Image (spheres, helix red, strand yellow):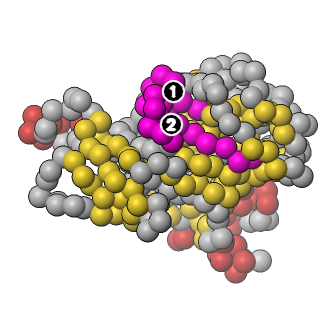
Amino acid sequence: MAIHKFHPKIYYNAFGTYTPVLRISDGDTVITSTVDNNGRDAADNQVTRPGNPLTGPFYIHGAEPGDTLAVHLEKLWPNRRIGRSSTVISPNVVDPEYVREMPPLEPRITAEWELDLERGTAMLIKPETNLGHFVLSLNPMLGCLGVAPPREQAISSATSGTHGGNMDYRGFVSGVTVYFPVFVEGALFFIGDGHAVQGDGEIIGTGIEVSFDVKFTVKLLKDKKITWPRAENKEYIMTVGNARPLDQALQHATTEMIRWLQADYGLKDRAAHILLGQCVEYDVGNVFDPAYTVVCKLKKRWMKAAV
């Protein structure tokens, strides 16, 4: 179990079967960084083209199709003091007749936030609004994370699928373990698109976009087959569906949760359905990008009670 310090020099704007930037093994930890969605680094310099540039891919020795890659997010934290966001919500989340009343959509990135990395806050410094110097607590999360897709596809980091991708789920924070189906040799794991803060759905098309310092540890689950990304923290197990329309994303997430409960928790026949019917919780990860994200959640205490 080794610790690797990796300083990225190239970035990709798609999840695909690219040449690995680093080869690591089961149980290894990586300390690295990401640029923001516009390709700006910790010094706020433009170092690559915009469009959710990704750090990676990381090749995991022994990973093969049909395995599962577990990625434990140990540390996610902004590494500069300026963050940026857009200021107008997406037209697809409001009534059509309201769209004509909205402010202009372009330019999208028009707000700046001052990040206090010691206090863990973000303060709106421009534009001037009647919110004043609006202050939020930091909740650093990764918008993009995933593995290379199946069939040697290259899928834009603007969207998501069974491989993960641009899910923009505010629950992907430090302390969470995320599970991905492995489709290619080495899995080829990518990360990027750090948000200092973001509301559910990423309804303005951004969070507070900023470059990150990242620390993660990988674990390879051999011959463990899953269909969609999964995750867990101390309180919940979670399954992710990425699709459009929104109800299809919900269907994928719910089906994956049923599979998990049946295969790993022994809830057969109607048991999983009864449990979900009364105890399930749903989060909306993203309703801005080409594929929407829905997260199906269940508190771990319900499974302990079932056993």
Residue 20 can be seen, yes or no: yes
* Along the line of sight, the residue nearer the viewer: 160 or 260: 160
The three-letter amino acid code for the residue at tag 1 is Val
- Residue 236 x %, y %: 62, 67
The residue indicated by pointer 1 is 47
- Residue 87 x %, y %: 24, 43
**Quarter assignment of residue 5:** top right
Identify which residue is drawn at 70% across, 80% down.
Answer: 305
Identify which residue is drawn at 50% across, 56% down.
Answer: 140
The three-letter amino acid code for the residue at tag 2 is Asp
Q: The C terminus lies in which quarter of the figure? A: bottom right
**Distance Cα–Cα, label 1 vs label 2:** 7 Å
Pointer 1 and pointer 2: residues touching (CB < 8 Å)? Answer: yes
Please tell me whether mark 1 sits on a helix, a strand or a loop: loop
Range of magenta residues: 30-54
Task: State yes or no: residue 47 in magenta.
Answer: yes
- Residue 285 x %, y %: 46, 49
Residue 285 can be seen, yes or no: no
Are there few (<14), some (14-19), or many (20+) residues within 10 Å of tag 2? Answer: many
The residue indicated by pointer 2 is 41
